Image (cartoon, helix red, strand yellow):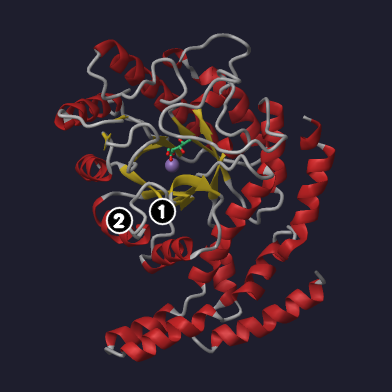
Amino acid sequence: MKTQLIEEAYRIARERYAAVGVDTDEALEKLQRVSLSLHCWQADDVTGFENRGGELTGGIQATGNYPGKARNVEELRADILKAASYIPGTHRLNLHEIYGEFGGEKVDRNEVEVKHFAGWIEWARAHGMKLDFNSTSFSHPKSGSLSLSNPDPEIREFWIEHTRRCRAIAEAMGEAQGDPCIMNLWVHDGSKDLTVNRMLYRELLRDSLDRIFEQKYDHMKDCIESKVFGIGLESYTVGSNDFYIGYGASRGKIVTLDTGHFHPTELVADKLSSLLLFTPEVMLHVSRPVRWDSDHVTIMNDDTLELCKEIVRCDALDRVHIGLDYFDASINRIGAYVIGSRATQKCMMQALLEPLAKLRAYEADGQGFERLALLEESKSLPWNAVWDMFCLKNDVPVGEEFIADVQRYEAEVTSKR
Ligand SMILES: C[C@H](O)[C@H](O)[C@@H](O)C(=O)CO
Ligand SMILES: [Mn+2]
């Protein structure tokens, strides 16, 4: 798109927003400081490098068989960099433990070390990308249906050791990058059928977590992620939302809200203000559930918009970390990264452009009609002209221009895999 047109549209939008008390230049600066944590697992359908060709187990599933997924660390890194080149701003990379570089060795999960991520730390430094991390309880012979809450002490110890080691890796990442590495802990533990021992497994999970978190670190932050149910584990989830809210609030841990992990009519955005009052920070996994936690590519829908608006309305841009979490194996995977990341940023752009002062003044005065009218009108204010300017400033394709570029990369690179 012509630079002149974008600048002209921006100039008009700036005036239009100024009329409702919004400074578009300030919104652009704020959006520039919002880093997304890009999930590495969209590039290869959550396969990782530990057990290539192995089954994805543990309550999650990637559906689709689109050609060209990343098969090794080089391809994964190239794909991430390609995707990032279409996403304005500076972003983080979120790694799972199964993406370590094990050099063809059999390194079991309770043996993983910082050295297996030395290459990632170096690569991230070279590309100005900060890292986040995740322990991996799924896709392993000892995953079963219970890991950290398993009554068998041998299996439980195995996963405690794994998670402790992952925290040490996250600490090393955080120290190397001079910025805390956020380590997410999600375990699939649950039961396919009825259980008569809900309390037992939750006690075991609480005790395992307490032991895992005994070691204090300065360069990493822990977050804990609940889920409503996993595939094959439909009747009971040990790490439910209530469990982790209780755990996070009582232990000062960050709770992760995955937008696919709640009942379909629950509004995840509504949870933010409550959590922020009782826990230090919040981690988000922005996804798009369709009927279930299907991990469809995030789009600019009401759920994501409301989520971003709540972050801004809670004045919590520095306390809410935004990670993406979806894995669609049925479409071009680089395109999936670009669509989901840009959609999240577009929602944040609109959130930052909301005429909040005016809306709040109406609300304080009990002017319900005026508040609703402005909320409605602000939906059609020219936020897209501000977004285009953001892309222009960041030297990434404006509008749909990235489609042809992604197609080119597919023709030249991923289709040859
Ligand atoms: C692969 C991730 O750890 C996983 O998606 C987790 O965050 C989750 O959301 C499981 O449903
Ligand atoms: Mn998640």
Estimate the x, y position of residue 241 in percent, counting from the top left. Answer: 27, 45
Which amino acid is tagged 2? Answer: Leu
Q: Which of 37 and 339 is in front in this view?
A: 339
Give the side of residue 403 with respect to residue 341, left or right. Answer: right
Q: Nearer the viewer, residue 246 or 229?
A: 229
Give the side of residue 135 with respect to residue 212, left or right. Answer: right
Q: Quadrant of residue 200?
A: top left
Pointer 1 residue:
320
Quadrant of the frame with the C terminus:
top right
* Whether label 1 touches label 2, CB < 8 Å: yes
For label 1, being within 8 Å of ligand 2 is answered no
Above or below 287: residue 78? above
Give the side of residue 402 with respect to residue 331, left or right. Answer: right
Earlier-in-chain disc, 1 versus 2: 2
Q: Which residue is drawn at 35% across and 15% down?
A: 158
Residue 267: which numbered mark, if any?
A: none
